[in-house]
Image: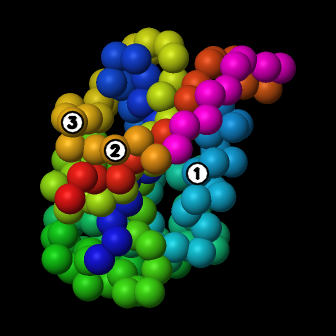
């Protein structure tokens, strides 16, 4: 099964603060949408709750939570990693979109990493697990300088796990 992790990470390995993104970066939001549209997305309950309008359109939203009593509109619910994977449509790419504990859970199974590196440090309470980049091969890199809409310099990377 094709498991990809997509994440925006700051210099200090931060990914969030108070259940929000670290900063507003329209380029990253467009990149996220371009890559995940039409695919399965797997997220934890807190990541779902951070979405401003609920389930993301044009994607199969799968929410991973240990609470068997909750359900969210337009989402499939899973209580463990196996249930989440069984809910994935086999012909689609599967993106893990957060949060930290879900990233950590799926990282050993991921074969692709879509990483936005924000070249800045932020106050944060949520961090991405440490990655051994010796296990990954850089496939694509696009560097972006700050502009009128994107306050921070950032780079998009795509990595494939070494076989």
Residue sitting nearer the eye, 13 or 55: 13
Spatial separation of the CA atoms under disc 3 and disc 2? 8 Å
Q: Residue furthest right?
A: 148
Q: For this rendering, which residue is in front, 13 or 162?
A: 162
Q: Which quadrant holds residue 112? A: bottom left
Crowd rating for badge 2 (residues with CA inside 10 Å; few <14, some 14–19, many 20+): some
For discs 1 and 2, the disc positioned in front in the rendered view:
2
Please say whether residue 67 is visible from this viewpoint. yes
**Helix, strand or loop at disc 2?**
strand
The residue identified by callout 2 is: 137
The residue positioned 52% from the left and 73% from the top of the image is 39
Q: Vertically, is 9 above or below 157?
A: above
Numbered disc 3: secondary structure: helix
Q: Secondary structure at mark 1?
A: helix
160 vs 66, nearest the viewer: 160
For marks 1 and 3, give the one nearer the viewer: 3
Residue 44 lies, in percent from the top left, at 32, 57
The residue at the point 16 percent across, 70 percent down is: 80
Does label 1 or label 2 sit earlier along the sequence? Answer: 1
Marks 1 and 2 close (CB-CB < 8 Å): no
For the residues marked 1 and 3, what is the alpha-carbon distance in whole angstroms? 25 Å
How far from the left and from the top, in percent, is residue 83?
Answer: 21, 79
Q: Is residue 145 magenta?
A: yes
Binning the other alpha carbons within 10 Å of mark 3 as few (below 14), some (14 to 19) or many (20 upward) gives few
The reply, left or right, for residue 153 in relation to residue 135 is right
Q: Which residues are magenta?
A: 140-148
Q: Kindly identify which residue carries mark 3.
A: 134
Tell me the CA gap for discs 1 and 2: 20 Å
Q: Is residue 6 magenta?
A: no
What residue does disc 1 label? 32
Of the numbered discs 1 and 3, the one sitting upstream in the chain is: 1
- Residue 14 vs 112, above or below: the answer is above
């Amino acid at each position: 099964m094709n498991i990809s992790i997509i994440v925006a990470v700051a210099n200090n390995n931060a990914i969030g603060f108070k259940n929000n993104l670290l900063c507003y970066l329209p380029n990253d939001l467009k990149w996220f949408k371009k890559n995940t549209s039409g695919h399965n997305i797997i997220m934890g309950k807190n990541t779902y709750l951070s979405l401003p309008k609920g389930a993301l359109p044009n994607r199969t939203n799968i929410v991973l939570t240990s609470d068997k009593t909750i359900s969210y509109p337009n989402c499939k619910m899973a209580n463990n990693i196996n249930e989440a994977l069984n809910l994935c449509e086999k012909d689609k790419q599967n993106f893990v979109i957060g949060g930290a504990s879900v990233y950590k859970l799926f990282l050993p199974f991921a074969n692709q990493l879509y990483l936005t590196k924000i070249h800045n440090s932020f106050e944060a309470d949520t961090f991405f697990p440490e990655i051994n980049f010796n296990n990954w091969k850089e496939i694509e890199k696009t560097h972006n300088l700050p502009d009128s809409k994107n306050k921070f310099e950032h780079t998009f990377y795509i990595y494939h796990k070494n076989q």
